[in-house]
Image (tube, helix red, strand yellow):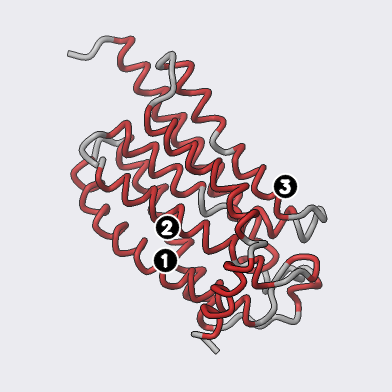
């Protein structure tokens, strides 16, 4: 039988992870409020006002919003001890993640084709940002699936995979409203890993391996993508990739 201390610890853990998921959801809502979710009632930023919302963008938005909704639902199911339903919905999550990779890649390539880049930069260089976010998401998601029999590892990797998707939402606010560039966006996305680090140190006295290695992968990819985006090899790849959707 669980002791009162154990039950209290489980309650604190559920509240922590639910709170972090809520913070992620709020960030997505804030980032895309004017440019998408509330566009019918709020004027979008001037740089986006002339860009039409294509069917691909609507599909892309539905899939990625569905991922956040599924993450919230999965967190609530675990809190309610409905692990059986949580596992069944995991099959939906796997299918959804695969569709997100396709829609995310196509949306990024079409964005580069339309010349989407902050501050009038080269859209081919900027393409490295969304594509690397998708690659990082895929790597962490697959790792989370493989660790689904180990809940503590699984939940951390799922959170880190979702955090990997935050740069576009952060960019909508940080770049378009505050005027900062991509390096600031990446730095802010790294900050979402900090609560998980603090939680581990407080409750475990050390970093959980999933937090350590997943966090290092997430943090290490940030400067890497900036460096790769300025290489001739990346520009050649971007030209080839964008040419596929012309």
* C-alpha separation, residue under disc 2 versus residue under disc 1: 9 Å
Q: In the figure, 39 relative to 84: above or below?
A: below
Please name the residue that numbered disc 1 is placed on.
Answer: 100
Decide if residue 111 is on the left or right side of residue 213.
Answer: right
Q: In the figure, 119 relative to 245: above or below?
A: above
Front in this rendered view, residue 140 or 171: 140
**Point 66% across, 43% down: residue:** 188
How far across and down, in percent of the image, does residue 123 sit? Answer: 68, 72
Please name the residue that numbered disc 3 is placed on.
Answer: 184
Q: Residue 140 carries which label?
A: none
Q: Which of marks 3 and 2 is nearer the N terminus?
A: 2
* C-alpha separation, residue under disc 3 versus residue under disc 2: 25 Å
Q: Which mark is residue 67?
A: 2
- Pair 2/1: label in front: 1
Q: How many labels does the image show?
A: 3
Quarter-wise, where is residue 225 in the image? bottom right
**Point 68% across, 71% down: residue:** 39
* C-alpha separation, residue under disc 1 versus residue under disc 3: 25 Å
Decide if residue 48 is on the left or right side of residue 80.
Answer: right
Q: Which of marks 1 and 3 is nearer the N terminus?
A: 1
How far across and down, in percent of the image, does residue 169 sit? Answer: 62, 57
Is there a contact, CB below 8 Å, between mark 2 and mark 1? Answer: yes
What element does badge 2 sit on?
helix
Q: How crowded is mark 2: few (under 14 residues within 10 Å), some or many (20 or more)?
A: some
Front in this rendered view, residue 216 or 27: 216
How far across and down, in percent of the image, does residue 24 sit? Answer: 54, 46
Is there a contact, CB below 8 Å, between mark 3 and mark 2? Answer: no
**Point 39% across, 36% down: residue:** 156
Quarter-wise, where is residue 242 in the image? bottom right
């Amino acid at each position: 039988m669980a002791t009162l201390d154990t039950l209290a610890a489980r309650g604190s853990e559920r509240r922590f992870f639910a709170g972090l998921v809520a913070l992620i959801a709020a960030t997505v809502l804030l980032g895309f409020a004017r440019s998408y979710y509330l566009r019918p009632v709020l004027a979008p930023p001037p740089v986006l006002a002339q860009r039409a919302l294509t069917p691909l963008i609507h599909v892309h938005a539905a899939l990625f919003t569905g991922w956040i909704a599924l993450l919230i639902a999965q967190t609530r199911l675990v809190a309610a001890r409905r692990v059986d339903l949580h596992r069944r919905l995991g099959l939906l999550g796997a299918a959804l993640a695969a569709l997100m990779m396709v829609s995310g890649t196509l949306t990024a390539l079409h964005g580069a084709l339309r010349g989407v880049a902050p501050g009038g930069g080269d859209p081919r260089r900027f393409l490295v940002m969304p594509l690397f976010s998708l690659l990082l998401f895929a790597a962490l998601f697959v790792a989370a699936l493989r660790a689904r029999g180990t809940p503590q590892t699984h939940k951390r990797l799922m959170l880190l995979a979702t955090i990997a998707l935050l740069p576009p939402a952060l960019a909508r606010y940080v770049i378009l409203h505050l005027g900062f560039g991509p390096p600031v966006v990446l730095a802010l996305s790294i900050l979402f890993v900090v609560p998980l680090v603090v939680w581990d140190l407080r409750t475990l006295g050390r970093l959980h391996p999933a937090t350590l290695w997943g966090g290092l992968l997430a943090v290490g990819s940030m400067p890497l993508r900036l460096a790769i985006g300025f290489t001739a090899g990346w520009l050649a790849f971007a030209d080839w990739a964008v040419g596929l959707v012309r």
